[in-house]
Amino acid sequence: MIINHYGYNTRTKESDMALLKLQRPVVFNQFVRPIDLWMTPLPVHRKCTITGWGSTRENGPRVNRLQEVNVTILPTDVCNQYYLGRIRSSMFCAGKDGGGADACQVRPKKIQDLDSGQRQMRAIMTESVSSCRLFTVLICLCSVSLYLCPLWSQGDSGGPLSCFTGSRYELAGLVSWGVGCGRAKRPGVYTKLQQHTPWIYDVMSDQNRVYTDDLTNKEDRCGEQQSSSCDHALGLVGLSMSQDGEVSVENVTESCPFFWPWHVSLQSNGRHYCSGALIHRHWVITAKHCNVRAKEDVVALGVHDLRFSSSQTVPVDGVFNLPQDGSFPPKSDLSLVRLSVPARFNPQVSPVCVPDEDEELDNSWHCVTIGWGAVKTTGDVDPDRLHHVGLTLVNQTTCRQKWGGLVTDSHICSHPAGSTSCMGDSGAPLFCRKHGAYFLFGVVTWGNGCCAADKPSIFTRISDYDSWITEVTEDM
């Protein structure tokens, strides 16, 4: 059984934890023991220990042997200065101001060499050992009854941060999030467990309680699609050229109705002119070049066929543009659109996840672009119905060879067919899926005007502007 913390926020990572109950009791021995929770205020500048199986350097390989590293608890005000106010009361930071110590930089130590106190770091005891055997809160090890883990998982997230009292180790936090690996002024951020002990005790003491996800909470979760009996397969995009030199896009198909509940239509005088992505009840992200007009344009949510009325049509209350440096093509091309009334979440309308600034795309992600409009396709695709296609990514080196200095680290490059000239829709998103959830990684910015097969499409990299998005949306 998995019991998610009721207060978990996918955007801010507050209350980033869950309880996992195993099917049978744990068997304690010299290698598996419980650990107490740290219950007193955590002293600033105290040295504590992280353990786990994460990478030992940024973007480095995963390791198979248990690792450990010592980090220093940092003041909250210093952390908030580094992370622009994103550290909440349920979090704390640990690392070094100059970098070089992080949850991804744990060093190996043989398990059999750990003393009995260090073994305690691999589990959490919140009751006596005897009762712990039947109903135990433990940290992400597969031989116990109940685990305590963060909900936000990347790398070896969920690793325990344990502090030595002088006689034994006690668990103070869980690895939650951060930026990069061991970067200067980017310490690791941890879930503060002592604030959640009432919830932990409540769950453990009520063993007969049925934990089901509340419908509203389920709808509030980002990036989750509704189940559908529709079988419109999502193919991988391709380009072909006819004998007379005309380029066609392959494998674009109509999506299942409402299969992408966060995809919205920006409209003026009843006509669609750009796509956008719903990230919050009050907020939509689109391309700046769409030139959305506050008080005039509307956002249509829960729409599949543009010829029919949407389930919700909301006027645009305000538009917030990412500052530009005047370059052309633009380095960044984003607008945040504030809705005049909050969107009503339901199976046809729900938000997509926004990646953190340290979230990197690799081959483990599966990406797709979506939109309306006339597609240069080999098949029969109705421009008024939402269509989709899988996109492959192009590495930065190859992309720069094709576009030169126009491409920066703030761009994501994809297969050429992702451009507006190929797919027919401005503001089209790049959604990528991993761990069962979709994230908005890009918004189409520019590409070749003729749908040329040798020019990658360029998307603005959303994760690079996570701080700006958080600052604008939380201030309103």
Image: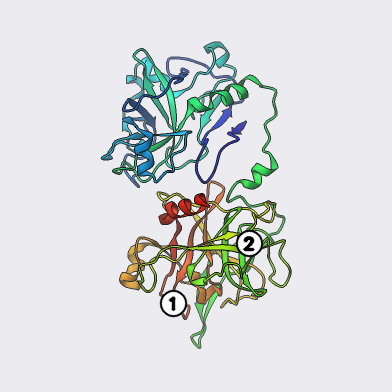
In this rendering, which labeled residue sits more in front, label 1 or label 2? 1
Q: Amino acid at mark 1?
A: Asn
Instruction: Measuring from the top left, give residue 283's x and y in whole percent.
Output: 57, 56
- Up/down of 356 relative to 375, above or below: above
Q: Are marks 1 and 2 in contact (CB under 8 Å)?
A: no
Front in this rendered view, residue 264 or 391:
264
Q: Secondary structure at mark 1?
A: loop
Residue drawn 70% across the image and 54% down it: 228
Residue ID at (60%, 75%):
373
Residue identified by numbered label 1:
448
Which quarter of the figure has residue 171? top left
Q: Which residue is mark 2?
A: 233
Q: Left or right: 256 with respect to 444? A: right
Relative to 192, is 277 above or below? below
Spot the residue most to the left: 98
Badge 2 local density, few (<14 within 10 Å), some, or many (20+)?
Answer: some
In this rendered view, identify the residue nearer to me: 131 or 411.
Answer: 411
